[in-house]
């Protein structure tokens, strides 16, 4: 029973991974890298999506300073671009905020 649980957890964790880095051949793409570096390693994305924040400015202004900082960071990430790449049996999504990598997701299909 334990072995089945371990195998199931391993399979689930391998299906989708959000990470701070991605190996591309013998190179590594990391959070904080520039858009130029992403294009050098992965080429032109097959799809780009622009994120949009659903929070209103009035709801953010009624919160404390610390909460506003968190809301602004969340809003900024939501307003970034998601660059999608098809890499063999993987779909890789690189989120770009202010020209820098802010998130990397690698999904095996």
Image: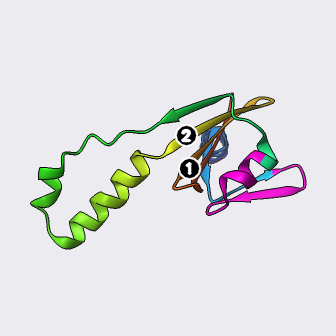
Disc 2 element: strand
Q: Position of residue 68 (x, y in %)?
A: 23, 64
Mark 1 and mark 2: span between their CA atoms? 6 Å
Give the residue drawn at x 13%, y 63%: 63
Residue behind mark 1: 96
109, above or below 4, in the image = above
Q: From the image, which quarter does the C terminus lie in?
A: top right
Disc 1 element: strand
- Neighbor class of circle 2 (other Cα within 10 Å; few <14, some 14-19, many 20+) is many
Give the residue drawn at x 47%, y 46%: 80
Mark seen at residue 82:
2
Q: From the image, which quarter does the N terminus lie in?
A: top right
Give the residue drawn at x 75%, y 45%: 39
Can residue 1 be seen in this snapshot? no
Give the residue drawn at x 13%, y 52%: 59
Can residue 32 be seen in this snapshot? yes
Q: Earlier in the sequence, mark 1 or mark 2?
A: 2
Q: Nearer the viewer, residue 44 or 104?
A: 44
Left or right, 77 with reference to 29: left
Left or right, 78 with reference to 105: left
Q: Which of 4 and 67 is in front in this view?
A: 67
Looking at the rendering, the stretch of residues picked out in magenta corresponds to: 24-39
Question: Mark 1 touching mark 2, by CB under 8 A?
Answer: yes
Mark seen at residue 2:
none
Query: Is 73 part of what is drawn in magenta?
Result: no
Q: Position of residue 33 (x, y in %)?
A: 67, 61
The furthest residue to the left: 62
């Amino acid at each position: 029973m334990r072995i089945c649980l371990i195998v199931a957890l391993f399979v689930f964790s391998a299906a989708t991974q959000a990470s701070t880095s991605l190996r591309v051949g013998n190179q590594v793409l990391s959070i904080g890298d520039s858009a130029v570096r992403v294009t050098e390693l992965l080429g032109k994305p097959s799809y780009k999506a622009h994120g949009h924040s659903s929070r209103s400015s009035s709801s953010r202004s009624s919160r404390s300073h610390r909460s506003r900082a968190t809301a602004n960071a969340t809003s900024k990430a939501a307003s970034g671009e998601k660059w999608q790449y098809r890499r063999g049996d993987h779909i890789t999504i690189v989120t770009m905020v202010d020209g820098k990598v802010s998130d990397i997701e690698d999904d095996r299909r």
